[in-house]
Image (cartoon, rainbow, N blue to C red):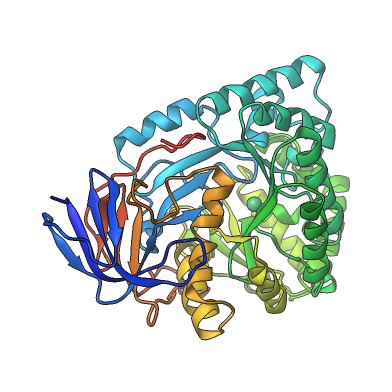
Amino acid sequence: MYDLKIVNAQLVSGDGTAGTPGEIGVRQGRIAALDRTVPGNAQRTIDAGGHVLCPGFIDLHTHCLPAVNENYLQTGVTLVVGGNCGFSPEDIQATAAACAGGCGPNIAMLIGHNTVRVAVMGNVNRKPTAAELERMSELVRQALSAGAVGLSTGLTYVPGNYTETAEVVALARSAAEFGGYYASHMRDEGDGLMNSVRETAEIGRAAGLPAHVSHLKVRGRKNWGRSRELLQLMDEFAAGGLDVTHDQYPYTASCGRILLLFPAWGQEGGPDDMRARLADSAQRARLKNDLVEHIADVYDSDGERVVITGAPDASLNGKSLADLARAAGRRNVPADLAETVLEIVARFPGQTDVYCVLHGMCEEDVKIIMRHPRTAIGSDAWAPSAHETRPHPRMFGTFSRVLGHYARDLNLFPVEEAVRRMTGLPARRLGLTDRGVLREGAWADLAVFDPATVLDRATFDDPMHYPVGFDYVLVNGVLTIERGQPTGSLPGVFVGRTGN
Ligand SMILES: [Zn+2]
């Protein structure tokens, strides 16, 4: 007797091979049988209507915490990796324990370098002492012991930006001792992109662990078209023996705090330091100058390319820098836009609360990167907070957009290959053998979707929509989504480095 049988399905295994008609029997959370036909009774039988039945998606790139995370369940994601870009919970053991309260998708965690550095040193622009570095290494070891899957950096953020390569190598060695991997939001995704890839590879090689580039992209108009050169460089490192992979979200805009527009020197310290900096006319002028250059350089001097997605004052959400400049009687030119940014930051010096969508990439690079065989699909998102009323559509649309828009409608690759980039490939990165695969004995993390209709509905102007086309989503053998509706079950668990 099975707990559940899914019949009349197109089985897509997650390794890229062609789908075949078949059935699956689920018992005690695992795939108990899988074949052309599976004889025997079940408590419940679901007819998949000939739709794709594949492993639930594994999202290597999220900022999720243990929670319902319904936006992930609604798009077939059954395992999220949190703690990316250098920011994570400090206490991984407590995070794992928090899953007992009920999680939608399963969750794994990276330990963040910025988090560890701030815990030991604060947000300061200097090298660590030997004792501080040892303390940071100890925190990384503790996190990996508690099940973290690796170390993440956000070298474009502070204090990552203040960090020399050798410091990251030292901490990555601590992660390597436990078999973890190194995931990096690199130092520079624009003019310094190639050197940033070299630094990431150097860290992987020197510390002896796999290197994974987060949200691979080419940023800034004058760099557009460099994706081929970028992938060629990464291929060279792979050919040289480095285990190197990357993830990507399927959009030409990124998303982050408004302070991403600021130079690194202008972000040191906390809110009081920021207030003091903005009150000092010489420092404010220098900041403005740097902002003008950045806006001209990366955003083509166009304030329409930067749009607020979530601010403490929700009336700002959906407004571009150009809108806000005009509302203050200014123009859509770099000097006026920089003034607008300074005013927003002065208004919310807590810094972390104002998020923007940043339109800085081109479609051709997105497609070229997506076609690369080592590109895993990752959302770089989280569950929206109450004040995020105009979030980046990747929060809702990432996986369905790749399946529907890019794979099916633009014919970039077959559906089986799209699924591989969402299952087998990320599972390999995590070292998991019993998730991200259709196999007897593997966990029954499963998604059923209609390949003919699956599609994202989230747009930049109107993002808060779940995709269409997902029929059923199971986490650890338990139905979490049934015909687009949540069942209310929260069967997700903490997935440690060695699986579970
Ligand atoms: Zn990032």
Q: At 86% from the left edge and 61% from the top edge, which residue is drawn?
A: 191
Which of 127/200 is in front?
Answer: 200
Q: Position of residue 217 (x, y in %)?
A: 71, 64
Above or below 121: residue 336: below
Residue 304 or residue 1, whichever sits in front: 1
Residue located 61% across and 28% down the image: 178
Q: Is residue 224 visible?
A: yes
Can you see residue 334? no
Quadrant of the image containing the C terminus: top left
Depth order, front residue of 417/291: 417
Residue 472: image x %, image y %?
A: 28, 64
Q: Position of residue 487 (x, y in %)?
A: 21, 56
Instruction: Please identify the quarter of the rendering in which residue 280 is found.
Output: top right
With 458 as the anchor, is 216 left or right in this view? right
> Is 421 situated above or below 181?
below
- Which residue sits at x=66%, y=26%? 177
Q: Nearer the viewer, residue 19 or 402?
A: 19
At x 68%, y 26%, the residue is 174
Q: How many marks?
A: 0
* Residue 264 sits in quarter: top right
Instruction: Locate residue 271: give its quadrant.
Output: top right
Where residue 435 sits: x, y (%)? 43, 48
Residue placed furthest toward the top: 131
Reply above or below: 379 against 113.
Answer: below
